[in-house]
């Protein structure tokens, strides 16, 4: 292996590495579905409410379709979430066996919120014909709130891993015994609010830009009916509103890391040694104790962190090498997250500027291509941010309390489980794509029965929608500029 390759991947035991890859695969897959589960009900609520307020049949049809997509994503997410629950106990018995009483509360509460979300999602899906319109719309509220509350519970566990609390740390350090357990203090630890404040906008960024990306692809292929425009507009609205909050909370969480996990921050910014007047490092790798191939902007890290160009910043040399995270993985993932987040913010700013001036979306092909790429970019930024958080905590599973190597299972067969899980996730991914593709094909063929109710005073009998996610109306062509291809034929 070259020196660069060796710098990127530190050697470790086979079992520990397999367990890490297994957890990374599960978390990396589930977090995307979790984001959609949290934010998609809010997006559906916006569309559904518009349909009722404005007598907009296209908006109601879009809400119904997105609801069906949410149900499919929820089902797959339930599978991946269940896998994660088992993995916590199977792969990391050292942590769960020792601290299960400390961090068990948020796991239990998350289960309750999960079932509430599932119950109300079922009511929403089957309520199109059995509930009054306004009451039906209101069922989306507990779905969205349950998703947010469940996310808080899971973030609370991860925040505890970054800031252990809720037990007597001194006694544990001296004797290895967990005493004076306070589950509420563990749940509301010193990291939870800042991590939650950063992750929650991320769910809306990912969901908004993914939905906009899907409809932008249809728009680029000539499906310029009104339903596609609604999907594009609402997706961009959610994503563009959330991305500034994401940037602000990103700055706050970086400052929090510098104060409470200085070695993680040193890896994020690739700061070799504690020094004053620290430059900002763009790109580069940490090899043999030196930063190689980077562009440095003098004093900028010190200036941003403490508003003082001569401020002292803790470096990697503050702890022994065995207590440092994989510097290059943390640094590159952090920079990728910042780069993509900045690009999404620029797209949001341009879209907002054009809308403010013209009350219309930009018409440039480059803008449309950027929107198409915004969904994958948001997902990649999410994965990079999660990598920064998790890898940056290494080698600790509970920061400065328990190492990952102490928590991992000693049982054989982790590699077999990893291979099996890869096969399962490939099957789940293929099934998800197949089901969504078939749903789109049916909508494209005009086989969908539209909403059984409309705005107050509208007819309540079944109607057939002339537009679809997959294609333009057969009656109205592409509908560009006419506003008529999304009409409902009765």
Image: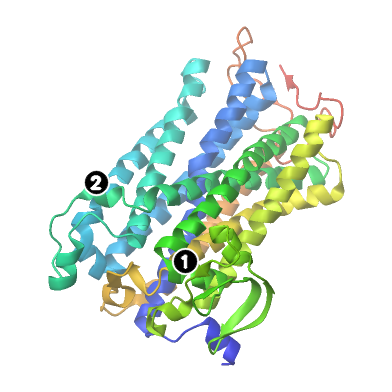
Between 133 and 263, the one nearer to me in the picture:
263
> What kind of element bears circle 2?
helix
Is residue 424 something that shows in the picture?
no
Q: Is residue 319 left or right of residue 379?
A: left
Calculate the distance from the C-alpha at mark 1 to the C-alpha at mark 2: 30 Å
According to the picture, the residue beneath numbered tag 1 turns out to be: 25
Q: Percent position (x, y) of residue 447?
A: 66, 33
Q: Is residue 380 above or below residue 142?
A: below
Residue farthest along the top direction in this orientation: 457
Q: Tell me if residue 244 comes above or below residue 227 in the rendering.
A: below
Q: Residues within 10 Å of mark 2 (few under 14, many from 20)?
A: some
Quadrant of the rendered structure where residue 172 is?
bottom left
For the point 49% across and 55% down, which residue is it? 253
**Viewer-side residue, 137 vs 175:** 175
Q: Residue at x 49, y 30 (%)?
A: 125
Which residue is depicted at the point 76% across and 52% down?
370
* For marks 1 and 2 on the same chain, the one whose residue lies earlier in the sequence: 1
Residue placed most toward the observer, 308 or 38: 308
Q: Taking 386 as reference, is 98 left or right? A: left
Residue at screen point 67% across, 16% down? 55
Residue 8, percent from left and from top:
54, 81
> Where does residue 168 sit, x and y in percent of width and height?
17, 60
> Can the viewer see residue 63?
yes
Residue 475: quarter of image: top right
Query: Counting other residues with Cα less than 10 Å from the Cα at mark 1, is it few (<14), some (14-19), or many (20 or more)?
Result: some
Q: For mark 2, what is the residue?
A: 184
Label 1 SS:
helix
Left or right of 175, for residue 462: right
Work out whether 53 lies above or below 69: above
Residue 53: x, y in percent?
62, 16
- Determine which of the numbered discs, if any, sits on residue 304 in the image: none
The quadrant in which the C terminus is found is top right
């Amino acid at each position: 292996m070259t020196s660069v390759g060796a710098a990127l991947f530190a050697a470790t035991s086979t079992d520990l590495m397999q367990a890490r890859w297994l957890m990374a695969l599960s978390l990396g897959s589930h977090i995307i579905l979790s984001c959609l589960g949290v934010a998609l009900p809010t997006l559906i609520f916006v569309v559904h409410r518009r349909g009722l307020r404005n007598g907009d049949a296209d908006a109601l049809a879009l809400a119904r379709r997105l609801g069906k997509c949410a149900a499919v994503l929820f089902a797959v997410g339930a599978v991946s979430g269940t896998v994660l629950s088992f993995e916590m106990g199977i792969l990391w018995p050292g942590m769960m066996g020792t601290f299960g009483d400390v961090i068990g509360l948020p796991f239990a509460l998350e289960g309750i919120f999960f079932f509430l979300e599932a119950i109300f999602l079922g009511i929403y899906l089957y309520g199109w014909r059995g509930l009054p319109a306004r009451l039906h719309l209101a069922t989306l509220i507990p779905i969205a709130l349950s998703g947010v509350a469940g996310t808080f519970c899971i973030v609370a566990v991860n925040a505890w891993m970054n800031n252990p609390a809720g037990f007597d740390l001194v006694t544990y350090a001296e004797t290895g015994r967990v005493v004076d357990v306070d589950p509420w203090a563990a749940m509301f630890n010193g990291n939870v609010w800042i991590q939650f404040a950063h992750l929650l906008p991320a769910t809306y960024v990912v969901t908004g830009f993914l939905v906009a990306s899907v409809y932008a692809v249809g728009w680029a292929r000539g499906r310029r009916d009104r339903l596609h425009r609604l999907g594009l507009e609402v997706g961009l609205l959610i994503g563009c509103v959330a991305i500034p909050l994401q940037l602000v909370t990103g700055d706050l969480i970086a400052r929090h890391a510098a104060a409470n996990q200085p070695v993680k921050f040193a890896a994020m910014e690739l700061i070799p040694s504690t020094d004053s007047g620290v430059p900002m490092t763009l790109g580069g790798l940490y090899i043999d104790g030196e930063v190689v191939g980077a562009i440095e902007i003098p004093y900028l890290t010190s200036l941003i962190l403490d508003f003082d160009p001569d401020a002292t910043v803790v470096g990697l040399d503050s702890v022994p090498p065995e207590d440092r995270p994989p510097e290059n993985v943390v640094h590159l993932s952090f920079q990728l997250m910042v780069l993509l987040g900045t690009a999404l913010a620029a797209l949001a700013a341009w879209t907002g500027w054009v809308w403010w001036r013209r009350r219309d979306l930009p018409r440039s092909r480059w803008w449309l291509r950027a929107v198409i790429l915004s969904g994958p970019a948001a997902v990649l930024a999410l994965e990079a941010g999660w990598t920064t958080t998790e890898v940056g905590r290494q080698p600790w599973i509970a920061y400065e309390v328990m190492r990952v190597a102490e928590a991992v299972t000693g049982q054989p067969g982790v590699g077999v489980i990893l291979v099996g899980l890869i096969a399962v996730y490939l099957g789940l991914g293929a099934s998800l794509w197949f089901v969504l593709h078939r749903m789109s094909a049916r909508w494209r063929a005009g086989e969908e029965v539209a909403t059984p109710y409309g705005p107050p005073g509208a007819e309540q009998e079944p109607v057939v929608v002339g537009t679809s996610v997959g294609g333009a109306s057969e009656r109205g062509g592409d509908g560009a500029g006419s506003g008529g291809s999304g009409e409902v034929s009765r």
